Image: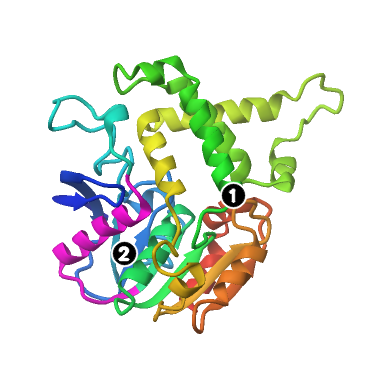
Amino acid sequence: MIKHQIKRTLKLEAGGLLKDARIVFHTSPAKSGKVIWICHALTANSNPEDWWPEMVGPGKAIDTEKNRVVCVNMLGSAYGSESPALENPESGKPWLLDFPKVTIRDTVSALIEVRKYLGIEKIDLLIGASNGGFHAIEWAIIEPERFARCAFLCTAPRISPFLGATVEAQRMALEADPSFREAKDINGGTAGLKCARAQALISYRSFHGYGLTQAEEDPDTLFAGRVASYERYQGEKLVRRNFDAYSYYALCWGLDSHNAGRNRGGVQKALQGIKSAVTVVAVDSDLIFPPVEGKQWTAWIPGARYVEIHSDFGHDGFLLETAKLSAILLN
């Protein structure tokens, strides 16, 4: 995948402008073939070969040599698009806590700017998983004639109270770190970020999945050290990926903003305006987007197909069950 950047001034849904906002995106080497557009999840980047290697690449289900594949880094992310980590042109310093609140719809505006820049009029397949599914659903509503097919994976048309609670707990972890509140530089809030990531991971996995991978090998162990070590490792891992606490904070506010029915007469009415062929995929052990919810809103999209897959690993099943997803997307 090839990295690109453009700058655009974006009108923000919560008010104000984001002037000359940087928008980073990747495209496959292929200049022809079907157009497949991928919307990435919360802490991923715009190169799906990096975080979805079993699905995207030469000879894979999403073949980058035969298809024109596009993925855009969402606003607020630490991986290149306009975010708290980048320089505020007015101050000459990183935005940090001065970064404006950006919504899911704001990022969709950025996606549309990239689409126009690339001269793409028709998208054969739009794929969005998790938070990326938020963007994909919004986009399918905003430009209903643009897409032939859409695949919404482990996602929903509106943030639920349960997910909202987990997001707020993660923000509280960031805010509890004094260095985050001081906002002296981009390294502030590292301890809070580690804690927030560890909290998030619990909701991404499942009871059974933790039992399979993190159970103590010693039946007489005094303390549950294995899973504790795993949680700390996951927090460290995100920090080592050069993700900063301020970008994570901005993305949490973006999650909170997700409501496809806002100013459209409600979620059900908004989804009825989607005109593409839609497949909704749920994972049976997903705590964040449970199948009972997925079945309900799939029925509100005209002609949509609902598919439920089994995984021991909860919400992260969309990253791990690649063979099952490949069969669904290619069908």
Q: State which quadrant residue 198 falls in.
A: top right
Q: Is residue 38 visible?
A: yes
Q: CA distance from mark 2 to mark 1?
A: 38 Å
Secondary structure of the residue carrying numbered label 2: loop
The amino acid marked with disc number 1 is: Pro
The amino acid marked with disc number 2 is: Thr
Q: State which quadrant residue 120 falls in.
A: bottom left
Q: Is residue 58 visible?
A: no
Q: Above or below — where is 196 with respect to 266?
A: above
The reply to whether callout 2 and callout 1 are in contact (CB within 8 Å) is: no
Q: Is residue 82 left or right of residue 235?
A: left
Residue lying at the far bottom of the rendered structure: 303
Question: Which of the two labelled residues, at mark 2 and mark 1, occupies the earlier sequence position?
Answer: 2
Q: Which mark is residue 64?
A: 2
Which residue has dot 1 on it?
A: 161
Magenta stretch, main secondary structure, is helix
Q: Which residues are magenta?
A: 102-124
Residue lying at the far right of the rendered structure: 220
